[in-house]
Image: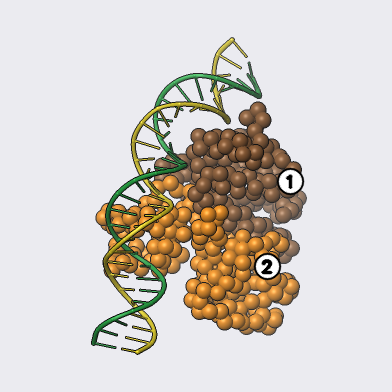
Chain colours: A orange, B brown, C yellow, D green
DNA sequence: CGCTCGTTTGAGAGGACTCAAGGTAGGTGG
DNA sequence: CCACCTACCTTGAGTCCTCTCAAACGAGCG
């Protein structure tokens, strides 16, 4: 899942940019123009439902790209990208990316693999969101986090309860109560408000 | 969104196969070996949750490929593929596909675009599953169907109520009651048990 | 005509959500 | 070093609404 080399991107005309925590990189509904990759920091992909409740579609870290799919299919963004920390991004325009990909079939295949991984993850996401039982939702969510991190032993889950809620479609209070229940059942551990799984 | 030409597939060693309605093409949890494309018929992608309730992740028609992503990332299938009608599929093994893609960068780019579309659709799916209001879920679902069909005028929705339920995470009865409500609100039309939107 | 599959209606229970209020922890500035 | 601030976490009470279960109707097909 290696990212595209920054130097290669720059040699094809990409530019880097600092973005402060909490700033919006692109808006749901707007037209895509760039391919983005995170050099440093963290970005969340979200969308708001009719009641204004936030759904977190994913959180991207160092080396991850984001917002690419709509770029390839000429559709508007289905979600908004917001930084969670001060970040540095690198971006390259669609036409320059096209040239880059034409010159480097290996990179195109690399993106193909990355897309396959995204699709796989989104299938898991659908299962999480469709589960009716909060315990199942949260455990599946934690499972996914753990697998992505590649961990075998319990790790500290780097999500706030609100973020877990917005990722699973539950409300914060239900997340809190369910985590306590899971802790009672010894399925997760809570130490000093932090969740270990 | 064009499918890969069947003759090209066959020239690289693909084979076709008839599959009767209701048969399973591959199982959730098994290892992927083939790239599949539908020549004729209909296939649903499903997974079962812990309570045994079915979640429909998508329904594929003529020309669509399915089950490709896990093939590219060396993971087991997150869902099961079942035919909804008597169907004809064409399949090609992973190594033969690799050669095909190496020889035909255009086809690789074609799959890239198709993957981008899948990711986009799955983002919409997440929004549908995360919506808390049944009316919103069903309307979003119908919207998506309509857009995929490329229709501007009301179309007959080719889904049973059970299928809508399993696609949106609701139960059949709620789908029925909500559709009636939507019909009262003139947001959908129901004629002879069929839904028009 | 009689299956079979899909649709419909009703009654009841459970549980997630909402709203409101208070607690905790870590960081910042005086 | 302490007080404050902000963001996050926690608890309680109550309502609403979806789900479950049960039973029956409708339509299409051999």
Q: Residue at x 48, y 76 (%)?
A: A85
- For disc 2, the chain is A
Mark linked to residue B183: none
Residue B91 visible? The answer is: no
Indicate left or right for B163 with D19 as reference: right
Q: Quadrant of the C terminus of chain B?
A: top right
Asked where in the image residue C3 lies, by quadrant, the reply is top right
Question: Where's residue B57, x and y in %?
Answer: 56, 48
Q: Residue at x 61, y 63 (%)?
A: A28
- For disc 1, the chain is B
Vertical comparison of A39 with B194: above or below: below
Both marks 2 and 1 on one chain: no
Mark 2 surroundings within 10 Å by alpha-carbon count, few (fewer than 14), some (14 through 19), many (20 or more): many
Question: Where's residue A73, x and y in %?
Answer: 70, 61
Mark 1 surroundings within 10 Å by alpha-carbon count, few (fewer than 14), some (14 through 19), many (20 or more): few
Indicate left or right for B52 with A31 as reference: left
Question: Where's residue B188, x and y in %?
Answer: 65, 39
The answer to which of A151 and B76 lies nearer the viewer is A151
Indicate left or right for A66 with A186 as reference: right
Mark linked to residue B151: 1
Q: Secondary structure at mark 2?
A: loop
Spatial CA distance of label 2 from label 1 is 24 Å
Q: Residue at x 71, y 62 (%)?
A: A74
The answer to which of B81 and A185 lies nearer the viewer is A185
Mark linked to residue A32: 2
Q: Quadrant of the N terminus of chain B?
A: bottom right
Asked where in the image residue A158 lies, by quadrant, the reply is bottom left
Q: Secondary structure at mark 1?
A: loop
């Amino acid at each position: 899942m290696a990212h595209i080399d920054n130097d290669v991107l720059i040699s094809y005309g990409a530019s880097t940019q600092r973005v402060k925590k909490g700033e919006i990189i692109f808006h749901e509904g707007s037209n895509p123009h760039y391919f983005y990759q995170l050099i440093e920091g963290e970005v969340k992909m979200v969308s708001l439902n009719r009641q204004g409740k936030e759904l977190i579609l994913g959180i991207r870290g160092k080396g991850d790209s984001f917002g690419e799919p709509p770029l390839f299919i000429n559709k508007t963004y289905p979600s908004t990208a917001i930084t969670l920390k001060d970040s540095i991004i690198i971006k390259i325009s669609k036409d320059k990316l096209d040239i880059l990909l034409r010159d480097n079939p290996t990179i195109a295949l690399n993106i193909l693999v990355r897309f396959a991984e995204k699709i796989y993850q989104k299938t898991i996401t659908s299962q999480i969101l469709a589960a009716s039982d909060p315990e199942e939702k949260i455990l599946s969510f934690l499972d996914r986090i753990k697998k992505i991190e590649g961990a075998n032993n319990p790790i500290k889950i780097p999500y706030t309860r609100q973020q877990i809620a917005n990722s699973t479609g539950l409300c914060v209070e239900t997340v809190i109560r369910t985590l306590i229940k899971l802790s009672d059942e010894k399925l997760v551990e809570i130490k000093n408000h932090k969740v270990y799984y």
